[in-house]
Amino acid sequence: MEQRRRLPKILCLHGSGTNIDIFQIQSRKLRGYLKDHFRFVFVNAPFSSPPGPGVLPFFDSDDDFFAWIPQRRRSRKPLARRIDLGKEEKEANEGLERALLETDEYDAPFVGVMGFSQGAGMAASLLLRAQQARNRGEESYWSNLQFGILFNGTADCLEWQAHRSSQQLKEDLIRVPTVQVHGLLDPWLNNGRLMLDRFFDRDSVRLIEFNGGHHLIPDEDGTRKLAEAIKEVSS
């Protein structure tokens, strides 16, 4: 057990309307290929949420489900949403830090972050924070992040950058190495492609596409190749 705690840590961020348990099940096969290389730490998002698409009836309706952005964003008019983004980002980041403190995982920094769907957007926002801190020559909790693993991402959390000018967004393209996975049958595929095109330097991205929907790669061969790509990007 002590030897495993010394492995480099990857922070794992679930999708909207799900929770730790669901993401652990979704990623079990992939983690099996990487168990000797990394330790995976899962946390719940800070905002309560109704269950996401496809969650019921496979998981208990009495379970608690969470999201990285609050439900109130969906009901606000566009101007009000823009005004509220700064508060929303602060609440999400503070909620993440509280979750890490509660799991006794706040001591040693993470080397990587893995996210699914809305959690991929949250992961991308952490990679951007890490990059910005390093560019300023600052030390921060997230400045040790070296890579990301993003599945079927949506850019909800990156809307926190919407106040920035086009020039600022271009200068802040995420250059931290990532493996990004897109299911070609995912109904939200365009969201993942938009996130990639708008917020990432393509030279830093290893893009993997598979013939599937809004889920992780299901087959053994595809999962094994994904694990190899992650090891390469993290080295």
Image (tube, rainbow, N blue to C red):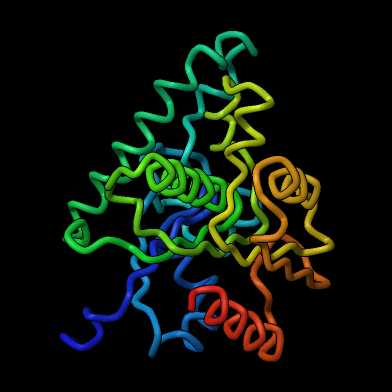
Residue at 61 percent across and 36 percent down: it is 171
Residue at 58 percent across and 14 percent down: it is 76
Residue at 68 percent across and 75 percent down: it is 217
Q: Is residue 207 left or right of residue 35?
A: right
Instruction: Please state the horizontal and vertical placement of residue 183, each as a whole percent of the image.
Output: 77, 64
Q: Quadrant of residue 94?
A: top left
Which quadrant of the rendered structure holds the N terminus? bottom left
Task: Establish if 74 lies above or below 106.
Answer: above
Q: Quadrant of residue 215?
A: bottom right
Instruction: Please state the horizontal and vertical placement of residue 122, each as a whole percent of the image.
Output: 50, 46
Task: Establish if 157 lies above or below 45.
Answer: above
Q: Is residue 171 left or right of residue 109?
A: right
Q: Is residue 64 left or right of residue 108?
A: right
Tell which of 104 and 130 is nearer to you.
Answer: 130
Q: Quadrant of residue 40?
A: bottom left
Task: Establish if 162 lies above or below 136.
Answer: above
Q: Is residue 199 left or right of residue 127?
A: right
Residue at 54 percent across and 57 percent down: it is 176
Instruction: Please state the horizontal and vertical placement of residue 202, each as a whole percent of the image.
Output: 72, 56
Instruction: Please state the horizontal and vertical placement of residue 6, each as a whole percent of the image.
Output: 22, 80
Tell which of 64 and 44 is nearer to you.
Answer: 44
Counting the numbered discs, the total is 0
